[in-house]
Image: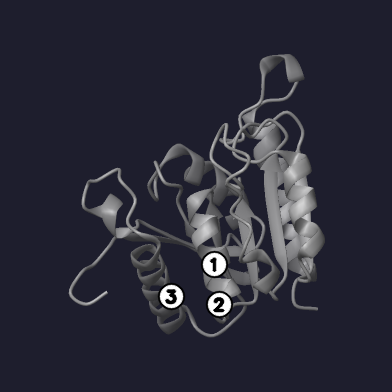
Amino acid sequence: MGAEETGAIYQPAVADAQAVFVCAHGAGGHMADRGMERLTQGLCERGFDLVRFNFLYRQAGSRRPDPMPRLRQCFEAVVARARAELGGGKLIIGGRSMGGRVASMMAADGFACDGLLLFAYPLHPPGQPEKLRVAHLPQIHVPVLCINGTRDEFCRRELMEEALESVRAPWTMHWLDGADHSFRVLKSSGRNEADVDSEVAEISARWLSRAGK
């Protein structure tokens, strides 16, 4: 990234670290927003060493995402720093929404990692299901866990399942019943955010135990 720098937070696994997960925020978020905090707590309790960071535009105080090449450059630089400081164990990349999409494009181009962990993958813009973000998915070859809500306006379930028919990677798709793009559920569902967070963390831990085997 040249002379540019960004912020990052390292959260070690509570015990028995199984992998380093470099986790990127969504387009309108940042490394310490509520969605990221919800994700990281449960993952750290289940064997993930967590590195989260701000993309450069967010570090500079902007809410307008950088172009994809600049997003990728930032992500790759953070991964390089994490590898240098945390060692060469199992590396997972991914993140929420746009952050996960950036990681998926890196992996599709052969970026070295042991797996992708995608939360609320933005398959298409809200209300524009014809604008699918799937062209690169068949080029991914590492194990993938993708978790989306059934009420996610960025990801119609039938369109995602259709897109995955052309994916050769070991892709695990998990649907959170009644959850929206932010993994919020309706009170009428009988569940709360803590229930959803626990489900997300448990599914992620199970997947991690199988990834790479």
Location of residue 139 in the rendering, given as x and y in whole percent from the top left corner: 66, 73
Where residue 178 appears, as percent x and y from the top left, is 73, 28
**Marks 3, 1: nearer the viewer:** 1
Element at badge 1?
helix
Can residue 106 be seen at all in this image of the molecule? yes
- Amino acid marked by disc 1: Met
Asked whether the viewer can see residue 22, the reply is: no
Percent from the top left, x then y, of residue 51?
A: 46, 63
Q: Which residue is mark 3?
A: 82
Residue on which the image places disc 2: 109
Quadrant occupied by the C terminus: bottom right
Q: Which label was assigned to residue 105?
A: 1
Whether the residues at callouts 2 and 1 have beta carbons within 8 Å, the answer is yes
Mark count: 3
209 or 141: nearer the eye?
Answer: 141
Within 10 angstroms of label 3, few (less than 14), some, or many (20 or more) residues?
many
Quadrant of image for the N terminus: bottom left
Tell me the element at label 3: helix
Distance Cα–Cα, label 2 vs label 3: 20 Å
Picture layout, residue 93 above or below residue 34: below
Residue at the image position 60 percent from the left and 63 percent from the top:
48
User: Which numbered marker is on residue 186?
Assistant: none
